[in-house]
Amino acid sequence: MKSFRNYKGIQNAFLVGLLTFSVFLLNACKKDFERMNTNPNNATDENLQQDGVGLGGFFPNMQIAVSIGCTNPGDPSTYQVGQGLSGDIFSGYMATATDFGPNNSNYVMRWNNAEFNTAYESVMSGWSQVKRRAQINNPDFYAIALILKVAKMQRVTDIHGPAPYSKFGMGGFSAAYDSQEVMYSRFFSELDTAINNLTVYRQKFPTAVPFKNYDLVYGGDYGKWLKYANSLKLRLAMRIAYANPSLAKKNAEEAVASSAGLISTNAENANLQSANGITLFNPVYYIQTGYQDIRAGATLVSFLKGYNDPRLPAYLKKSEIDPNLYLGIRTGINLPSGKVMNSFSQMNLQPNTPLRWLTAAEVCFLRAEGALRGWNMNGTAKDFYEAGIQASFDLWDVRNPSYKEDASSKCADYVDVFNPKNNISTASGELSTITIKWQESDSFEKRLERIITQKWLAIFPDGQEAWTEFRRTGYPRVFPIVVNLSGGLVDTKIQIRRLTFPESEYRSNNAEVNKAITLLNGPDNGGTKLWWDKK
């Protein structure tokens, strides 16, 4: 594995806009979980002037790396080890159908490096190059680079905690880590810079779309990029609500008050998708159909079934065991031998289903929580809560007029058709009893659980964000794993709080990663809480 610690004069940003479109995964072998491939090409200033690529050549790969998109349908393995075998299963959305032996699903940290590596391979290196070339003369391109940098590094720090950030690109063969608190402070500052740059550019050149040929999200529409930046700022503000309430309130209210606005319709959703001759494939689709490694999670199925949720057939396929049933697998169980678990429900995704970064529904639920906390969100918690449900229904083209008025339906009991030891019921006290209908007279905590549970249902299938919000709030009540092999490092009831630092960091950046453990305020294991995890 290549070390990315030589930050002095990084020249390895990936040029996806070139003819070969050489993405970081193309030479990877299927399920090569221990090795991350790197681009051998160096991008020189001369290269950047060829074929009209210029600054734009850095951006497609930066965007793909934010959510680890896939340009090769035969090899979604980097996504699998980066999110599929962590956030997607820890969130309750999905579960492994393959017996990998002791692994992340049993709290044995077998895969923990993919998000970290792609962040520095693609996004941070690309940002460094764009900053050097564009910060002064092309502030609009620099603004997009900043937004992508924050979007990716938010994921990295919310997985691991401290990370190399402010000292990145300053020279030397090692990189100092920043605390998560410092990183979040810089996130807000960088988003403010990006928002200001794009606002000024649009005022000067209201019809210009110079980023169009490099944009896999918004087709070069800076107005939508501004809405995404503000919405991302609102998400990050809510993330620190328990760690720094005053800073959270300030940034959340600024995001809502911005003249550029927030994502408010599904047409403004931030989706990574095919464009400009680049074909993207949904990695989850290929992991479940090609590798046959993933199926629907028991927690997701139980909530959807218990709520009689119209999104159930939109999200999932019926099982092969019984074509009339939706069946999910509980995470962290002793899997039976063979491929019998492949008969459980698959996610109802297509090869071209986009990877959603942030949606109108999520923004509504963020504003609902902000209003619940007494922040100025320009509306009530109830109104935003119900608007979030509707936005999600509209996105998935489903209807149920009485859903928001349902005051009795609850999460359904889970029954494992092969092993009753994995069952979980209301009698266990581990199931959520939260209902759907908004009740203004309910306690703060009960209303918060209602908001986050519906938010969790709405942001499917982004398991990374769902797992992060579960850790921040405790909601929804994700089923605990059955077989915990952490040796007591991770509490089964509290569930896993983070992934450990990559082994490659201990090999190539040892002194700094050991300093980072002091910033973590706990040992480098899955049971240590992150800075914002204060509840």
Image (cartoon, rainbow, N blue to C red):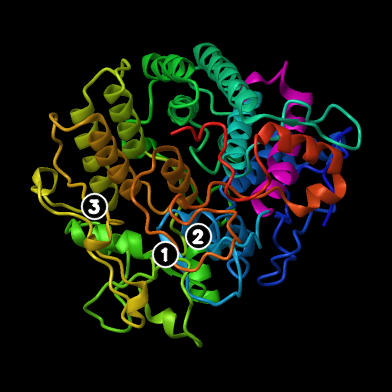
Alpha-carbon distance for marks 1 and 3? 16 Å
Write down the region rendered in magenta: 113-140
The answer to whether 41 appears left or right of 352 in the picture is right
Which residue is painted at 78% across and 31% down in the image? 168
Q: Looking at the image, is mark 1 or mark 2 earlier in the sequence?
A: 2
Observer-nearest residue: 75 or 234?
234
Provide the residue designation for mark 1: 350
**Residue 267, how many percent across, how many down?**
35, 38
Q: In which quarter of the image is the C terminus?
A: top left
**In the image as oriented, which residue stretches furthest toward the front?**
488
The reply to whether dot 1 and dot 2 touch (C-beta < 8 Å) is: yes
The answer to whether 79 appears left or right of 332 in the picture is right
Observer-nearest residue: 89 or 7?
89
Which residue is painted at 32% across and 40% down in the image? 452
Disc 1 marks a residue whose amino acid type is Gln
Which residue is painted at 34% across and 36% down in the image? 360
Which residue is painted at 33% across and 48% down in the image? 476
The answer to whether 248 appears left or right of 485 in the picture is left
Observer-nearest residue: 355 or 426?
426
- Label 3 SS: loop
Provide the residue designation for mark 3: 397
Taken as a whole, is the magenta stretch helix, strand or loop? Answer: helix
Q: Looking at the image, is mark 2 or mark 3 earlier in the sequence?
A: 2
**Residue 160, how many percent across, how many down?**
63, 43
Provide the residue designation for mark 2: 282
Q: Quadrant of the N terminus?
A: bottom right
Res 42 visible: no
Residue 116 located within the stretch drawn in magenta: yes
The answer to whether 148 appears left or right of 21 in the picture is left
